[in-house]
Image (cartoon, rainbow, N blue to C red):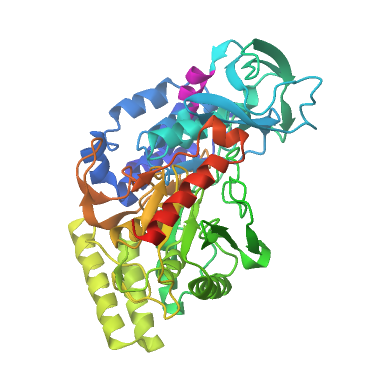
């Protein structure tokens, strides 16, 4: 690293409009070393994917072969995408974006239009409607285009990766796609009309905003990029005791960038319409959640949607959620918890909600942490602060055990055992006195991410209720922000841990492991929302199906 820094000092004063080959090699090496020092799932990726991200020789050859800055940034993206880890990603300083005014997603294997902005694409120019199939763009089949776009939002679940790539067919932000600035003024789209089955072609304008960049320039001032510091991606959780702040960045379990074009992603409103006779109680806003009740076959069913695990105030949201659980306990026969299309958020917040739906002591998820020196110091600070805070002896013992585990793993240059990241330091959590005690089901899908994986995993591990829906995204760790490069000023998000479940999970695709990463949470009852029938009927078939399931749970069948 000292040799590289010496090269950096010599190069910093150069004034080229684009990066030199040496600057590209330096930047790529800094990025790779950031992952080498901090990436928690490294050994899992070697085992599960048969891929070693620390074998840099082929990547350096690709860097040297790049002809311009955009090609160089694409290599950086390819490198991070090779990890198949939705928490690990890059971001660029770009304001440019191009959009077509409609969104697409994959329903039953076909790319269907699922929303249209008629201000941007009036009916006179684009007579296609929701439910029509997008077949090609400028003569290229959409399947091939999706394959090329997958690297920009690669996540643990292959189906989710393709869905997120399908969203990018019509939305091209340069902060995510370096080559987005090269889109033409128009594009010819080919659409198969659902009603007639006929293929129709339309020439549509791209709506462009912001300023596109084509090169990156050079950094005029030298700085030591060998030790980029971690940064939290979420505001501090106000429900955390002050002594937990030193490890606050480890408590972020959220997709780093919300995907554009996924309908109702992270939204208070569900993707489906409310069932007949639904009585709304909460509708977001200061309440954060949406909730209500409806009657089916003489049973009163409670329903609550958790749009994310990132409330403006965790304290206020926990109080509201607890109030709703108390109401549901007194007034319903069963409960549906909707965690679909949830981007994740705070580990502390998701555990607080779990304490209000699991009415007995339960095992939460642990974290195997890449034990860097900075985290060893942070865990020491937690222990010291907790002592000054006056934490109870049993809590101090757990926190001391966690610190010793991190310290030992740091000395050995590896990862810790399965540690709790909550304020008690314990993997066993106690329920709230007002926890909901009646039957429940939890809805999840392949766009439920990170803490959105965490919530159904704990419900399932502890036998609290059935998980209904589709295999979750498989983002099984936390995410911390770093300065990823120097000259190209690329931001990097690095996964520093692995969530660990109560028991190993057996799958056909991966080695048996207790991890959420890549494996995701497999539903107890598969119920796929992504059908054309649901798209065209506001999810009525989906609602009818999960209503039948909760009624079966209520009856004990």
Q: What residue occupies the far front of the structure in this picture?
A: 298
Q: Position of residue 287 (x, y in %)?
A: 63, 67
- The residue drawn where x is 31% and y is 43% is 519
- Relative vertical location of residue 148 with respect to residue 448 in this rendering, above or below: above
Write down the region rendered in magenta: 142-149
Q: Position of residue 137 (x, y in %)?
A: 60, 16
Q: Nearer the viewer, residue 76 or 287?
A: 287
Left or right of 495: which side holds 276? Answer: right
Q: Nearer the viewer, residue 232 or 474?
A: 474
Location of the N terminus by quadrant is: top left
Overall secondary structure of the magenta section: helix
Total numbered labels: 0
Quarter of the view holding residue 247:
bottom left
Q: Does any portion of residue 144 appear in the rendered image?
A: yes
Q: Position of residue 479 (x, y in %)?
A: 42, 53
Q: Position of residue 44 (x, y in %)?
A: 25, 44
């Amino acid at each position: 690293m000292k040799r590289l820094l010496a090269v950096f000092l010599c190069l910093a004063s150069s004034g080229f409009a684009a990066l030199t080959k040496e600057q590209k090699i330096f930047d790529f090496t800094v990025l790779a070393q950031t992952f080498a020092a901090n990436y928690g799932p490294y050994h899992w990726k070697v085992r599960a994917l048969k891929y070693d991200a620390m074998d840099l020789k082929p990547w350096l050859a690709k860097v040297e072969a790049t002809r311009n800055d955009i090609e160089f940034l694409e290599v950086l993206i390819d490198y991070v995408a090779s990890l198949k880890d939705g928490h690990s990603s890059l971001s660029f300083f770009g304001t440019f974006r191009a959009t077509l005014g409609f969104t697409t997603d994959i329903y039953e294997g076909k790319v269907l239009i699922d929303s249209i902005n008629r201000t941007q694409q009036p009916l006179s120019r684009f007579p296609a409607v929701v439910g029509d199939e997008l077949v090609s763009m400028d003569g290229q089949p959409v399947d091939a285009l999706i394959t090329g776009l997958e690297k920009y939002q690669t996540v643990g679940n292959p189906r989710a990766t393709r869905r997120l790539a399908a969203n990018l067919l019509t939305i091209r932000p340069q902060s995510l796609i370096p080559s987005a600035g090269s889109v033409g003024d128009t594009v010819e789209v080919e659409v198969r009309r659902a009603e007639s089955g006929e293929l129709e072609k339309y020439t549509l304008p791209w709506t462009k905003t912001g300023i596109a960049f084509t090169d990156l320039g050079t950094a005029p001032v030298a700085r030591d990029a060998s030790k980029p510091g971690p940064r939290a991606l979420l505001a501090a959780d106000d429900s955390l005791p002050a002594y937990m702040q030193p490890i606050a960045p480890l408590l972020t379990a959220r997709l780093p960038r919300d995907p554009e074009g996924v309908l109702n992603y992270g939204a208070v409103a569900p993707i489906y319409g409310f069932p007949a006779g639904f009585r709304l109680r909460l509708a977001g806003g200061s309440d954060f959640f949406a909730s209500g009740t409806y009657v089916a076959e003489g049973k009163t069913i409670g329903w609550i949607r958790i749009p994310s695990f990132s409330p403006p105030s965790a304290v206020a949201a926990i109080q509201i959620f607890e109030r709703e659980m108390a109401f549901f306990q007194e007034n319903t026969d069963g409960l549906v918890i909707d965690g679909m299309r949830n981007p994740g958020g705070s580990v502390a917040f998701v555990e607080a909600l779990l304490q209000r739906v699991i009415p007995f002591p339960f095992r939460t998820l642990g974290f195997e942490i890449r034990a860097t020196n900075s985290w060893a110091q942070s865990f020491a600070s937690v222990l010291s602060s907790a002592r000054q805070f006056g934490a109870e002896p049993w809590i101090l013992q757990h926190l001391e055990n966690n610190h010793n585990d991190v310290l030992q793993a740091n000395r050995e240059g590896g990862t810790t055992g399965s540690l709790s990241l909550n304020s008690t330091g314990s993997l066993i959590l106690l329920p709230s006195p007002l926890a909901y005690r009646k039957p429940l089901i939890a809805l999840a899908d392949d766009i439920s991410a990170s803490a959105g994986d965490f919530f159904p995993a704990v419900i399932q591990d502890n036998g609290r209720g059935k998980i209904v829906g589709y295999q979750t995204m498989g983002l099984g760790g936390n995410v911390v922000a770093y300065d990823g490069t120097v000259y190209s000023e690329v931001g990097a998000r690095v996964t520093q841990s692995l969530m660990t479940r109560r028991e190993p999970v057996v799958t056909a695709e991966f080695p048996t492991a207790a991890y959420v990463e890549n494996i995701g949470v497999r539903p107890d009852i598969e119920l796929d929302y992504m059908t054309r029938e649901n798209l065209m009927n506001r999810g009525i078939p989906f609602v009818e199906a999960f209503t039948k399931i909760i009624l079966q749970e209520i009856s004990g069948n």
